[in-house]
Image (spheres, rainbow, N blue to C red):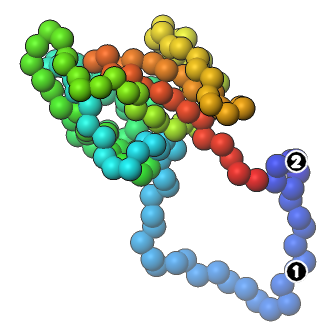
């Protein structure tokens, strides 16, 4: 018995109970990563960065890779990449993309192990912490921990 999920002993059933397997189609578990957005997000990248982007978004962040180097899926939206020519990416703005993850402490261990620099950011209200990191194309990504509601 653990503190989080105490086991409660059950009484014997008064009738013979034989559960039947539900024939309904099983739904996939939700992805543990969410884009904080109102629609799909498109980020700019340079040609040739696709393997690094897959390793960053698919491997590190935990988004599902739908199309390698082009499209990643979170629980709620898609993050699309658009390759542009040039040694420098011209952006309309430099606002960060907010991605909600399950654990900032686990992400910090991964960032340190992969020697990826990041910045700790304090939020506007008490208790809000985020990490700000750049993806391989230089896009600013802000990682926020999902808070469990009790």
C-alpha span from label 1 to label 2: 25 Å
x and y, in percent, of residue 83 in the image: 15, 26
Residue beneath the point at 85% across and 90% down: 14
Dot in front, 1 or 2 = 2
Residue beneath the point at 60% across and 41% down: 146
Q: State whether residue 129 appears in this view.
A: yes
Q: Where 87 sits versus 45, above or below?
A: above
- Mark on residue 79? none
Residue extending farthest bottom: 15
- In the image, taking residue 14 as reference, residue 45 lies left or right, namely left
- Mark on residue 12? 1
Residue 147's quadrant in the figure? top right
Q: Where 31 sits versus 93, above or below?
A: below
Residue beneath the point at 64% across and 81% down: 19
Residue closer to the observer: 131 or 7: 131
- The answer to the question of whether label 1 and label 2 lie on touching residues, with beta carbons closer than 8 A, is no
Neighbour tally class for label 2: few under 14, some 14-19, many 20 plus, Cα within 10 Å: few
Earlier sequence position, callout 1 versus callout 2: 2
Per the image, label 1 sits on a secondary structure element best described as loop
**Residue underneath mark 2:** 3
Residue beneath the point at 80% across and 92% down: 15
Residue closer to the observer: 32 or 132: 132
Residue closer to the observer: 26 or 39: 39
Q: State whether residue 68 appears in this view.
A: no
Q: Where 150 sits versus 63, above or below?
A: below
x and y, in percent, of residue 139 in the image: 33, 22
x and y, in percent, of residue 18 in the image: 68, 83
Per the image, label 2 sits on a secondary structure element best described as loop
x and y, in percent, of residue 17 in the image: 73, 85
Neighbour tally class for label 1: few under 14, some 14-19, many 20 plus, Cα within 10 Å: few
């Amino acid at each position: 018995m653990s503190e989080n999920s105490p086991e409660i002993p059950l009484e014997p059933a008064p009738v013979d109970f034989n559960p039947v397997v539900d024939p309904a189609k099983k739904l996939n578990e939700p992805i543990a990563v969410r884009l904080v957005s109102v629609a799909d997000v498109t980020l700019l990248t340079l040609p040739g960065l696709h393997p690094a982007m897959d390793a960053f978004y698919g491997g590190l962040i935990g988004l599902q890779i739908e199309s390698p180097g082009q499209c990643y899926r979170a629980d709620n939206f898609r993050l699309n990449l658009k390759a542009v020519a040039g040694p420098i990416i011209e952006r309309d703005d430099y606002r960060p993309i907010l991605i909600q993850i399950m654990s900032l402490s686990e992400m910090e261990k991964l960032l340190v192990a992969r020697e990826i620099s990041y910045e700790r950011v304090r939020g506007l209200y008490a208790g809000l912490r985020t990490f700000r990191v750049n993806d391989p194309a230089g896009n600013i990504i802000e990682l926020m921990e999902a808070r469990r509601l009790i």
